[in-house]
Amino acid sequence: MNNSLVDQVVIVTGAAGGIGSAIARTFHRLSARMLLADYDEDGVSKLASSLDPTGERVIPVAYDASKPSDADTVVSTCIARFGHIDHVVPAAAIFEDQPFASMTDAQWRRTMSINLDGVFYICRRAIPHIRPGGTIVTIASSAAHEGCSPEHVHYGASKGGVLAFTKSLARELSPNIRVNTVSPGTIDTPMVTELLRQKGDKFLSITPAGRFGTGEEVGDAVAFLCSNASSYIMGQTIHVNGGSYMGG
Ligand SMILES: NC(=O)c1ccc[n+]([C@@H]2O[C@H](COP(=O)([O-])OP(=O)(O)OC[C@H]3O[C@@H](n4cnc5c(N)ncnc54)[C@H](O)[C@@H]3O)[C@@H](O)[C@H]2O)c1
């Protein structure tokens, strides 16, 4: 990786989560400046001050991905502090158990509003402020490629939407803004703690790496896609899954 991320301005949503916080630590190590947004106001504030006690290079914002007005606040706060945007990484998402036969319209809508609408809201508002050479890196999932585990149809559909959103947007914004996605497999974060407790052995048996992934391993792929080292990569997916799904 070269030095192309030094002082670059990055928005990370879902930044208090297992993967989002690892992405934030990776960008901090690479000397980027960041706005970290999350529904977990306390968590994201603690993360920001642990990375940058001065508050000059890393700022936290309380944010609900399902609210368009919160996306406005994130973008206007970022512009007020840093003047522009270089990279957007919308990682906020939920993963709720719900058998499809009893899934309500409200449960379906809640997942779609955070996992898919939220990606639209933040990207739509950020794009006019992204400098040429900037990037958007969405976070899809293996679920977008091979379907999700039972009781997660809404999650699988939302991530399939994120994947198609990414490729479509890449065609529209290239070459000024490159748009790509990272599709994680099973990454050991709070999102899947319960799933792994119940079905961890099964998931492990189909993972050639013989272990689950870390947020840092996702963060490295995201940083690569934001850097000049990936300058000819557009509308693509990097699978970070230990070989559990070998996508083309
Ligand atoms: N962990 C995995 O195995 C895995 C696999 C594939 C994809 N992913 C994706 O990676 C991304 C990060 O997941 P993670 O594993 O870190 O999960 P996580 O649960 O640890 O983190 C998710 C974060 O999103 C935040 N969030 C939830 N609802 C929100 C809302 N309405 N507005 C703003 N923030 C909200 C949470 O507060 C949390 O900090 C997600 O997009 C997820 O779908 C994770």
Image (tube, rainbow, N blue to C red):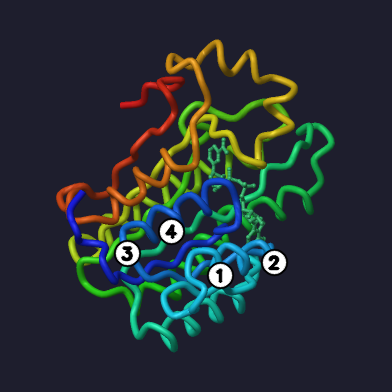
What residue is pinned by disc 4? Answer: 89
For the residues labelled 1 and 3, the Cα–Cα distance comes to 15 Å
Task: Write down the quadrant of residue 217 in the picture.
Answer: top left
Where's residue 101, x and y in %? Answer: 81, 32
Q: How many discs mark residues in the rendered view?
A: 4
Amino acid type at mark 4: Val
- Determine which of the numbered discs, if any, sits on residue 42 in the image: 2
Give whichever of discs 2 and 3 has the lower sequence position. 3
For residue 137, side relative to residue 171 (left or right)? right
For the residues labelled 3 and 4, the Cα–Cα distance comes to 16 Å
The answer to whether the residues at label 3 and label 4 have Cβ atoms under 8 Å apart is: no
Amino acid type at mark 1: Ser
Where's residue 94, x and y in %? Answer: 66, 48
Q: Is residue 199 placed above or below 48 in the rendered structure?
A: above
For the residues labelled 2 and 4, the Cα–Cα distance comes to 20 Å
Identify which residue, 182 or 190, lies in the foreground: 190
**Residue at the image position 55 percent from the left and 29 percent from the top:** 147
Q: Residue furthest top?
A: 205
